[in-house]
Structures are given as C-alpha cells and as structure tokens.
Image (cartoon, rainbow, N blue to C red):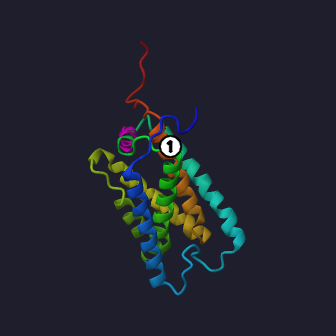
Amino acid sequence: MRLDSKAKPGGPRGSIAVEFYLGLALAGFLWHAAAQDTNDFWRASPEVGALELLWTPLLGVAAALVVIAAFRAGERRWSWLPALHRDFRALLGRPTSAELLALAAASAIGEEIFFRAAMLDAWGPWLSSLAFALLHVPPRRELWPWTASAGLMGLLFAGLTLWSGNLGPAIAAHFVINAINLVYVTRKDPPMVLRGPVQPS
C-alpha cells in the first residue's frame, strides 16, 4: 500500500504550523546572532570539523530509533500514549506524505535552532529543556506525561548538541522522531491498552 493512500491535503493547520516553526527558527537565529560574535549557529564549537558534521547526525538517528522503540513498547501500558495518538489524529487528519515531511522538518529545524542553538547556549541544558517541555503542554491533564517526556527529549537533544559540538545530531534525532511518529499517528490506529494480565476465557 502506498503511504499516500487515502491521504488528503492537511489544510491551513499544517501550513500555519510550518510557518510557526520557521518563525521560531528565525527568532533563534537572531537571538544567537545577537548573543555571539559569530553567526554560525550550527556549530557550538568552532573546532568542529567537516568530518564531525557529516557523521555525528547518524548518532542522532540511532538515538531516535531507540526512543521510538521505547515509546512503542509503552503504548500498551501507558494510557496517555494512545490518547495522545487519537488527539493528534483528530488534529492532523490525513495529510499527504509531503505535508508530513515538511511539518517534521520544520518542527525539528525550528525548535532546535531556537532551543538548542540559542537557548541552550544562553540558559544551559536544564532551563532550555524546561522551556522546551512547556511548549508541549497539552490542554488535558491526562496528557501531561507528554510534557514530561518532551522535557526528557530536550535533555537528550541538549546532550547530543553539547557532546557533538553541533546541531546535526539533535536535528536528525528530532526529525526522525517527528517523521516516524507523524506517519504512525495519521496512518495507524492506536493500540488497545492492557490494564492487567490477560485472563484465559
């Protein structure tokens, strides 16, 4: 089956989200430019060479796959994950593959430039990750664990950035997590939550 099967254009919501993330990227770029002597927001350290810029994003991809596997394993145990799945599906509908990739790329690039290139440098990993978590506060209390998980993801992305000295691993991890999850929630039904041991009939 093709990925775009039964997909419909996402409408104005998707384009508004992409514009928001591009605005966030611009704000992060300007913040970093005002705070630093250089406009090189991609590298946290000027000593990072071209070879590191090429291979370190692979570490981000590997980290993303571990995170996704952990969340998939938790879906049948934590009721908030299927609930979040349903909410995102209701919000996004059935956007096309191109729209999903654009949203995943814009959110990864915009948030990483703002929170890791600019805010991490200015506020450090803990406060920047807290601010990142607060951007992911849902309206329903039962979904607040998503906010906590966003804070942990913020710390992961900050750690990748500080360790590698560049934004490549964090952007790669963020993009892979977003892209796979967006495809998953818009193309698959949420699993049933197992609330206890299954009894034989």
User: Quarter of the image containing the C terminus?
Assistant: top left
**Most distant residue in the bottom direction:** 37
Image-quadrant location for residue 45: bottom right
In the displayed structure, 196 sits above or below 68; it is above
Residue nearest the viewer, comparing 190 with 197:
190
Where residue 75 appears, as percent x and y from the top left, is: 44, 38
Residue at (43% x, 59% y) in the render: 18
Where residue 60 appears, as percent x and y from the top left, is: 59, 58
In the displayed structure, 96 sits above or below 41; it is above
Residue nearest the viewer, comparing 49 with 125:
49
Can you see residue 125?
no
In the displayed structure, 141 sits above or below 130; it is above
Image-quadrant location for residue 69: top right
User: Quarter of the image containing the N terminus?
Assistant: top right
User: Pointer 1: what residue?
Assistant: 183
Residue at (61% x, 54% y) in the render: 61
Residue 84 is a magenta residue: yes
**Secondary structure of the magenta portion, mostly?**
helix
**Most distant residue in the right direction:** 51
Q: Which residues are magenta?
A: 79-88
Residue nearest the viewer, comparing 179 with 120:
179
**Most distant residue in the top direction:** 201
**Type of amino acid under label 1:** Val
Position of 49 compared to 178: left or right? right
In the displayed structure, 160 sits above or below 76; it is below
Where residue 199 appears, as percent x and y from the top left, is: 41, 18
Residue 194 is a magenta residue: no
How many numbered marks are there?
Answer: 1
